[in-house]
Image (spheres, rainbow, N blue to C red):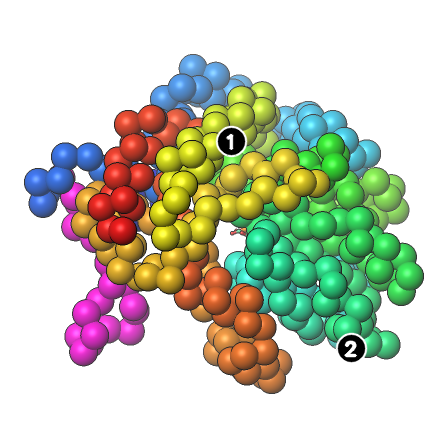
């Protein structure tokens, strides 16, 4: 998995050269005399815009020593629930914690199967495994790269307890058929919305569409903390109560524990930062969508595939993904021009060593496997300039 930050530029290790990784960080383009450097994400540029709001917000939490729980967390939970159009939101320590807690709170555990996709970040399936359940994969749709809803029925067994669609890259999965299938088989639907803050399905925000929705506030996400963080949203008051309890050591009140739980809390400083940033999210999303539109316009009639926004979707472009049959060479070409790119995700989960025990093989999920070979993520963030977009596009055009 390629974890990105503001300077990730990856270069393939030449075949034959000894290394246990396929890619390494490139030299700073400036050192090679390349004039423009386009980062993958620019968190410093974002901070520069909001510094005057962020710094006093952090200071206030420190002055009040409201580090764990407290009013800043409660305020942000309320704001985020309202933003998603959901009744309850519970701050947690990461997106992975949000998924794990949701599964446990919905009663999913050993012996159960959870249907999800092999085209996602491993956190989705790690959460399933640590709950004790087993991941059952369904291939993805070739246009949206999200779960292919026509294949879900075929994966259901008597042990299936939940469907866990991922709104990958910022585009919602096709939720109506998922909810219809879930209703028919009495299954829980847990949305992995880690990459999709503010994305909409048929005009409704993701997160509150299924039984439970899970978000990540990893710094590079569309709404990112200054450290790890996550959120569970739900309209079910009992599930909300259970998640709140389990995420805080199963503590019903001081010194009284009704369950064994976890320490999965979101801290006050992160909540205060996220409250500030949430006010900017709609604007940042509009800018991401504008940037995606510019890429779409400028990348027409080239030998690459640009993203498809489904009719039912408002895509928030956490990642802008193109597909190329010469992906690796194109990536190297762009990196040499100072353009940081990423692969999301270069090894499909069913082919990861960690999931050998699930018994899938190459060929089990052909659409996902093609994605793993062909997808390339271009720089995408709200502050991306027209000049930077042109530099990326010119690099792709040169390569054709
Ligand atoms: C699709 C998906 N699910 C889950 C997660 C887990 O989130 P976190 O890194 O906050 O644990 C991520 C984050 O990388 C993700 O992209």
Q: Residue at point 50% right, 76% down?
A: 351
Query: Dot 1: within a 10 Å radius of its alpha carbon, few (fewer than 14), some, or many (20 or more) residues?
Result: many
Q: Nearer the viewer, residue 130 or 235?
A: 235
Query: Dot 2: within a 10 Å radius of its alpha carbon, few (fewer than 14), some, or many (20 or more) residues?
Result: few
In the picture, the disc for residue 219 is none
Residue 34 placement: quadrant = top left
- The stretch of residues the image draws in magenta is 10-30
SS at mark 2? loop
Q: Main secondary structure of the magenta part?
A: loop
Q: Residue at point 16% right, 43% down?
A: 29
User: Which of the two marks, 1 or 2, is nearer to us in this view?
Assistant: 1
Q: Residue at point 24% right, 56% down?
A: 332
Magenta includes 27? Answer: yes
Determine which residue is flagged by label 2: 111
Q: Of marks 1 and 2, which one's residue comes earlier in the chain? A: 2
Determine which residue is flagged by label 1: 289
Q: Quadrant of the N terminus?
A: bottom left
Residue 225 in the image, given as x and y percentages of width and height: 51, 36
Residue 56 in the image, given as x and y percentages of width and height: 47, 17
Residue 150 in the image, given as x and y percentages of width and height: 74, 63
């Amino acid at each position: 998995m390629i974890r990105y930050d503001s300077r990730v530029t990856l270069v393939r290790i030449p075949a034959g050269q000894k290394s246990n990784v396929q890619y390494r960080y490139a030299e700073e383009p400036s050192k090679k005399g390349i004039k423009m450097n386009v980062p993958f994400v620019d968190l410093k540029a974002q901070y520069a815009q909001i510094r005057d709001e962020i710094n006093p917000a952090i200071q206030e939490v420190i002055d009040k020593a409201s580090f764990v729980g407290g009013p800043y967390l409660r305020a942000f939970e309320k704001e985020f629930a309202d933003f998603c159009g959901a009744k309850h939101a519970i701050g947690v320590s990461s997106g992975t914690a949000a998924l794990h807690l949701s599964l446990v709170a919905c009663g999913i555990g050993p012996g159960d199967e959870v249907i999800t996709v092999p085209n996602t970040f491993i956190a989705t399936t790690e959460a399933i495994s640590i709950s004790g359940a087993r991941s059952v994969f369904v291939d993805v749709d070739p246009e949206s790269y999200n779960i292919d809803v026509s294949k879900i029925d075929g994966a259901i067994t008597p042990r299936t307890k939940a469907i866990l669609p991922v709104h990958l890259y910022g585009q919602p999965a096709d939720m109506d058929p998922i909810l219809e299938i879930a209703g028919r088989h009495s299954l829980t639907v847990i949305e992995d919305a880690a990459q999709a803050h503010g994305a909409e399905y048929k005009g409704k925000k993701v997160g509150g569409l299924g039984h439970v929705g899970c978000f990540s506030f990893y710094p590079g996400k569309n709404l990112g903390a200054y450290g790890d963080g996550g959120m569970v949203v739900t309209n079910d008051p009992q599930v909300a109560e259970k998640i709140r309890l389990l995420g805080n050591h199963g503590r019903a009140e001081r010194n009284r524990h009704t369950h064994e739980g976890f320490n999965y809390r979101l801290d006050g400083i992160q909540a205060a930062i996220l409250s500030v940033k949430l006010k900017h999210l709609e604007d940042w999303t509009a800018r991401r969508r504008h940037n995606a539109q510019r890429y779409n316009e400028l990348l027409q009639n080239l030998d690459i595939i640009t993203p498809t926004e489904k009719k039912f979707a408002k895509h928030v472009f956490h990642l802008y993904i193109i597909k190329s049959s010469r992906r690796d060479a194109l990536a190297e070409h762009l990196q040499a021009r100072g353009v940081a790119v990423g692969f999301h995700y270069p090894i499909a989960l069913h082919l990861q060593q960690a999931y050998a025990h699930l018994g899938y093989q190459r060929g089990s999920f052909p659409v996902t496997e093609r994605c793993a070979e062909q997808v390339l993520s271009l720089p995408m963030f709200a502050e991306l300039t027209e000049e930077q977009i042109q530099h990326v596009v010119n690099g792709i055009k040169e390569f054709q």
